[in-house]
Image: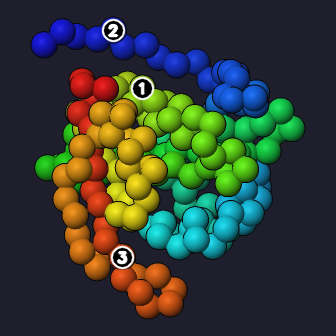
Amino acid sequence: MATRKKSKRAYPWTDKVGDHTITFELMKPEDRDRMLRFTQSLPADDVMFLRKDITQPVIIDDWIEKIRRGATKTVLAHNEKGDIVGYASLHLDQLLWTRHLGEIRVVISPKLRGIGLGRRLVHEMFEVGRQLKLQRIVVNMRRDQIHVQQMLERLGFKAEALLTDWLMDAAGRTHDLLVMSCRLEES
C-alpha cells in the first residue's frame, strides 16, 4: 500500500465555492455566538435528527469544551461578512476498541446547498482525520437523504448498516438510520 504524504492544513484559508468566497477555519471559543446564530437560523428539519439540539446555548458551550479537550475538531465555513454558512465536525471516540474511528457531522445553510460546500467540508474532515491518524470516518444519516448518500458514495463512502425504524421525528414517525463509512487510505 502506497503511503500518502500528510499535509497539515493552515487555517484560516479562503477559496471560491460556486460563486461564493468561503473562508474555512477551525472553530474556537470566540465563535460561540456566531455558531449559535447559525444553528438557530436552521430549519427545524435540519436539527431534528442531530444527536443534540445545537440551537441551545448550553449545547454549544459543551461543544466548545469538547474542542478544548480535543474530543471534537470542527471546521467552520463562513462568507465574506463573517457569517457561518456551514460546518463539519469530527467526533473522536474514546473507547479503546473504536479509537481508530471518527464520526463526521456536516451541516450546510439551505441557501448554499448544492454548490459543493458539503463536499469541501467532508474533504477537510478527511485531512483532519489523517492528521489524527484515524483509519475510518463514519457518517450516520437518515436513509431518505438520497442526495447526501450519493455524494458520500462519490467520495468513497460505503453503506455499512441499515437500522430500520431507528430514528423518531417530533410527530412520532420512525425513520431508518443508514451508517456509512470510508477508509481514509482509500479517500
- Total marks shown come to 3
Q: Secondary structure at mark 3?
A: strand
State the residue in front, 124 or 131: 124
Foreground residue, 116 or 85?
116
Residue 63 placement (x, y as % from top left): 55, 56
The residue indicated by pointer 1 is 127
**Residue under numbered circle 2:** 5
Q: Residues within 10 Å of mark 1 (few under 14, many from 20)?
A: some
Q: Position of residue 142 (x, y in %)?
A: 39, 65
User: Dot 2, crowdedness within 10 Å: few (<14), some or many (≥20)?
Assistant: few
User: What is the C-alpha distance between the residues marked 2 and 3?
Assistant: 41 Å
Please name the amino acid that badge 1 sits on. Answer: Glu
Quadrant of the rendering where the N terminus is positioned: top left
Residue at position x 63%, y 37% from top? 115
At horizontal 19% and vertical 59% (from top left) the residue drawn is 161
Closer-to-camera residue (147/121): 147
What residue is disc 3 on? 175
- Which amino acid lies under the numbered mark 2 shown in the image of this protein? Lys
Question: Spatial distance from mark 3 to mark 1, Cα to Cα?
Answer: 31 Å
Label whose residue precedes the other's in the sequence (2 or 3): 2
Dot 3 amino acid type: His
Q: In the rendered image, is residue 58 in sight? A: no
- Residue 114 horizontal/vertical position (percent): 60, 42
Crowding near pointer 3: few (<14 within 10 Å), some, many (20+)? some
Q: Secondary structure at mark 1?
A: helix
